[in-house]
Image: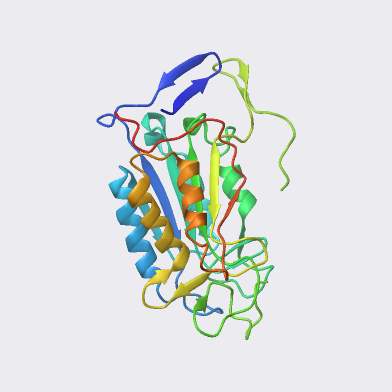
Amino acid sequence: MWMLQHCTSSISCLPRKVRTRRALLICNIDFEHLSRRDGAQVDVQGMTKLLEGLGYVVDIHLNLSAEMATIMTDFAARKEHYTSDSTFLVFMSHGVRAGLCGTKSRDEATDILSLNTIYEKFNNQHCRALLGKPKVVIIQSCRGGKVGSVLVSDAADLSVPAPSSAHTTHAALEDDAICEVHLESDFATLHSSTPDTVSWRRSTTGSIFIQHLIEQFRNHAYNSDLEELFRKVQYSFGKFPQQLPSKERTTMSRKFYLFPGQ
């Protein structure tokens, strides 16, 4: 069972009847300068159904440009996080090596949401309501590479000009508890692909990564912790050599079960 440890105190996972789990889902489908992400609507529907089944109320936002950062700030400030035991942050868009493309993106320098921004918005300094609680980041996007010929890639269309804040070393201080905590902790991230490679999507059934993730969570979330679920998703790509999900920037030191028996 996930234990929420705050300085010297330990608080067990909140009972299902009183916890207020929230999830954020941002999906960009239509772009001003890049190709439409056909099939992404299926991903939104599938992820929403999965997260709701796991007990999360899902905040859905579609087709955002620079507003992505503002939406994250607003979500991080939600009071429900104080009585939640975790959150999911799901991002689906065209992508480049440095981050996610907004709807106005035309190259690697315009309307790009840096991946670092996600962690900064929800670190222990800027989102104290989620201090010590699992923050699960799911990213469906390309990170470079070229467009394929059979499946639809989530790389920006290379026929047009295409997309191809370091952490401070000082820990944040929790004044109310008078103790020092890590600036960034309790994140677990699964990216749809490894750096510099593409993520594949079918125009009718959605992203292959999202399909595999939903299947593994539905089949195994009842008895597997989060990192084991991530491993199962990765393993499911064994016969699809064109893509391999990557577990990155994971700072959870304890096991997180989505169904802790409460």
Picture residue at 36% right of the left edge, 57% below the top: 215
Q: Looking at the image, how many numbered discs can be counted on the residues? A: 0
Towards the viewer: 13 or 78: 13
Does 147 sit left or right of 92 as displayed? right
Q: Return the x and y of residue 139 as percentages of the image width and height.
A: 52, 57
Picture residue at 59% right of the left edge, 42% below the top: 250
Check the image and report above or below for 248 versus 15: below
Q: Residue furthest left?
A: 17
Picture residue at 46% right of the left edge, 39% below the top: 77
Q: Return the x and y of residue 220 as percentages of the image width and height.
A: 36, 46
Check the image and report above or below for 174 versus 87: above
Q: Return the x and y of residue 32 as percentages of the image width and height.
A: 52, 78
- Quarter of the figure that contains the C terminus: top left
- Quarter of the figure that contains the N terminus: top left
Does 80 sit left or right of 98 as displayed? left
Confirm whether residue 58 shows in the render: no
The quadrant in which residue 168 appears is: top right
Towards the viewer: 23 or 42: 42
Check the image and report above or below for 232 versus 211: above
Q: Residue furthest front?
A: 239
Does 115 sit left or right of 222 as displayed? right
Q: Return the x and y of residue 66 as percentages of the image width and height.
A: 55, 61
Confirm whether residue 196 shows in the render: yes
Towards the viewer: 98 or 10: 10
Task: Identify the coloring.
Answer: rainbow
